[in-house]
Structures are given as structure tokens and as C-alpha cells.
Amino acid sequence: MKNLKYWIMLILASFFWAGNYTLGKAVVAQVTPLQLTFVRWLFASILMLIIATIIEKPNWKQVFKSWPILLFLGFNGLIGYNMALYTALKYTTPVNASLVSALNPALMVAVSAVVLHERLSKLQKLGIVFSLSGVMVILTQGNLARIVSLDFNRGDLLMLIAIAVWTVYSIVGKRLKTIKPITASAAAALLSTLVMLPVVVYQTKAPIVLNTSGILSVVYIVLFPSVGSLMFWNLSVRQIGAAAAGVTLNLIPVFTSLFSILMGESITLPQIIGGLMVFAGVYTTSGLLENQIEKGKKKRGEAV
């Protein structure tokens, strides 16, 4: 299979990110979303700088000449996305947050069509509408009357902001071809921590204290969703594109649901129905359904 290793990387990235939803909710009960975001990228940037120096051997002076776009990527994909995500987890469940995030692939295709002028077929447009409908089922908990009263969970709405920010990050990041992916991730993470530092110092009136489970959760978040997922995602997106890579993000709610069930949480019927609608919509939007239809036509033609 072509690009098999990149697809494996994307699956692992989604698996690691699913853990971030579950463990992130536990950690933000002890620290603020800003503090968690800062600690996460402070340690992740150090690790990625070391890995980039060993593997890619960049000229750091040349790299930081591109600081405006690196700062933009860091502000969006690292600070913006994670602040929105961790704040959302204070108000909604990891499963709900991950199900709303499943809209991301369809959003990437839609934004790519507008920004990059990529044409969408009728099936792809239908898929986007179906995905949006599934998200509305999740947002309203199956009671669509809430749309009229605008009665939504603030955490679910914050997840919509999070996926919009991540879409911008992925599309802009794809265009950054002059800097190798691990190096770009490391530099963006470092710049992000520098931007957050004065705000964190101002906000933190006392030392950050975590219990043992909180410390272990942060270690996981630094090593896997931060370093592992980010490097796997950036490497893969450059090879196969944001729209195609975005399809694997559908695995995040699947893995998150499994983690949540293992931790004793229940899954509601609206979550299941809405999630299936989102998956079906993304499957259509990604072009996979059209490919299957085309293959079916060819087989029938060959049979005749």
C-alpha cells in the first residue's frame, strides 16, 4: 500500500490524541487550561528541539528567519487549539469533545475548496451537510428544539472553535515546505511557550501543584499527544495532504469512547447517532464513497 507508514503514523497520532481528551479533562480539574498548555509545550519543545537537532540537523538561524509564520502556526495550532480544547473539557465530556472534533475532516475539505479553490462534487457537499447535521445532534443532545433557543453546552461550542483553529493550522502548515517538519514543530512550540510565559507568570499566584495521577497524565500529554502526534501529523500531512490525512481524525472519538468506557463513563444514544452521522458525512466528503462507486462502475463495465 502506497504511503503505508504515513497512514500508520496518522492512526497512532489519533490514538495518542484520544488519550489527551480523556486525561486532559482530569488535569484541568487541578490547573488552568493556560497552565496545562504552557507546561505541555514547554517540555515538548525541549524534546522536539533535541530530536530535530539529531535527526534533521537544521540551521537554526535560518529556521528562525521564518519566525512570523512559525509564530502564527504556534499561536493557532498549539496555543489556540489547546486552550480551546482544555477549556472545553471543563464543561463537556471527552466523548462529546472528540465527536465534535470529528467534523474537522469535512471542514478541512470545505476550507480547502474556498482557500485553495479545490472543486467539490455534489456528494462531497452532501457529506459536509450530513456531518454538520450530526454535530447538531451532538450539540443539542438529540433535542433539536435547542437550536431555536440557542441552548448549547459551552464546551461543545468551544470545540467548534478548536477545530476551526486546527484547520487553519493544517492548511497553512502544508505550505511551509522550506523547513523540515520536526524542526518546524519544535520551533513553533518554542515560540508558543515564549508567548505564553508572561501571561502564565501573571496568572499563576502560587506554584503549580499536581497529584500523582496528574503528573503522570502530564507526562503522557507531553510525550505522546504533543511530541509523538504532532511529529507524525506534520510528517504525514506533507506527504499525503491535509484533506486526506484529516480522514483519520475520525478515529479520535472511537479511541476516546473506548478509553471513556474503560474509565466507567457511559455513552448516550444522541452521541452514537450524531457520531455515526458525522462519520458517514466525512466518509462521503473525503471522496472514499465516490471512489467505491467508480470502482463498482468499472467492475460492472468489465463484466459486460
Image (cartoon, rainbow, N blue to C red):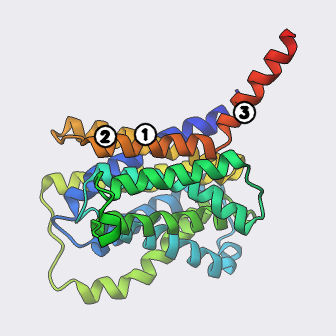
Q: Is residue 151 left or right of residue 44?
A: left
* Relative image position of residue 244 (x, y in whole percent): 65, 46
Q: Three-letter amino acid code at disc 3?
A: Asn
Judge whether residue 220 can be spotted in this image: no
Q: Circle 3 is placed at which residue position?
A: 291
Element class at badge 2: helix
Element class at badge 1: helix
Up the image or down, 199 lies above or below 280; here it is: below
Q: Residue at x 35, y 72 (%)?
A: 38
Residue 276 tag number: 1
Q: Residue at x 66, y 36 (%)?
A: 288
Q: Three-letter amino acid code at disc 2?
A: Ser
Judge whether residue 213 can be spotted in this image: yes
- Cα–Cα gap, marks 1 and 2: 13 Å
Element class at badge 3: helix
* Relative image position of residue 93 (x, y in whole percent): 25, 54
Q: Three-letter amino acid code at disc 1?
A: Leu
* Relative image position of residue 199 (x, y in whole percent): 33, 87
Contact, mark 1 vs mark 3 (Cβ under 8 Å): no
